[in-house]
Image (spheres, rainbow, N blue to C red):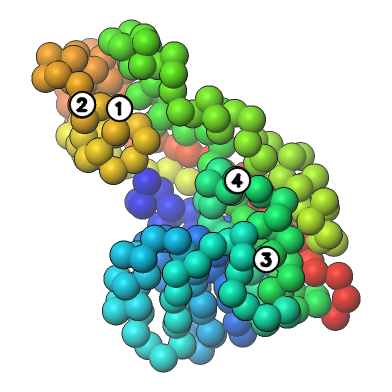
Amino acid sequence: MGRWSARLAPRFLDFCELGGAASYLDVGCGTGVLAKAIRARDAAALVVGIDPAGDFIVRLAAELADGRSWFCRGDAMRLPFANACFDAALGLLILQHMTDPLHAVSEMRRATRPGGTVATAIWDFQGGMPMFSIFWDAMAVVAPAVAAERTANKLASAPGRSEQSLAALWRAGGLADVRTTTLAVDLEFTDLDDFWTPFLSNATPSSSLVAPMDPQTQAALEAEIRARLFGNRPDGPVRLAAKAFAVRGRVPGG
């Protein structure tokens, strides 16, 4: 998903309209996709990232050791920062991981100065991610029992399944001037292997279902995906689109 996120981050920042921001909090910074996008636009800005995964933090601290970037391990539910520290608190693709999204939004608002911006984006998993639609449709044919228990069912009821639910969450979190949009990106896969290999990594919820399959079932799933991607044409490049919902709001005052 990192390649998709890297394409989404600049469009998300465009939507946030943060031309005057000098300090950013990157909540759930992960591998640093958003922090790097911010840094590419403004080398002088202060970027502080927080994430529960310590290995991400160590890697990012070494990669962005520029004196204006700082990363720490921590929980979005208990941000270790004083009130009104940042011009903007942003979270790219984190909402689906939150056990209490409203509390996380309130924490982001608390850490942002009056007049500052709080924003997030979340993939449209209900119809805006053909990559996963193809995977799960193929899984339903090859391993229907696995498909029936798909972890994506949890996302169906998560906040962020529409622009409207994101806006309602932001207003409930005490933010003003709430705006939403749908962001579209696309990505070209060089061939079937480029699409399929990440599903063998055992590093994501989807790939963790594929990894323990016996070789015959894996091969059947790969063949089903091939048919859905290419039909009767030869293996080769294929371009897929993706959609994300985004929301931003202003901290009252300022």
Residue in view at x 37 percent, y 35 percent: 205
Which quadrant would residue 11 be assigned to in this image? bottom right
Local secondary structure at mark 2: loop
- Numbered mark located on residue 212 in the image: 2
- Pointer 4: what residue? 99
Q: In this view of the protein, can residue 11 be seen by the observer?
A: no
First of labels 1, 3 by sequence position? 3
Q: CA distance from mark 1 to mark 3?
A: 34 Å
Q: Is residue 38 above or below residue 125?
A: below
- Pointer 3: what residue? 108
Of badges 3 and 4, nearer the viewer stands 4
First of labels 1, 4 by sequence position? 4
Q: Pointer 4 and pointer 2: residues touching (CB < 8 Å)?
A: no
Local secondary structure at mark 1: helix
Q: In this view of the protein, can residue 91 be seen by the observer?
A: yes
Which quadrant would residue 140 be assigned to in this image? top left
Residue 214, percent across and down? 14, 19
Q: Is residue 162 above or below residue 149?
A: below
Q: Residue furthest left?
A: 215
- Numbered mark located on residue 209 in the image: 1
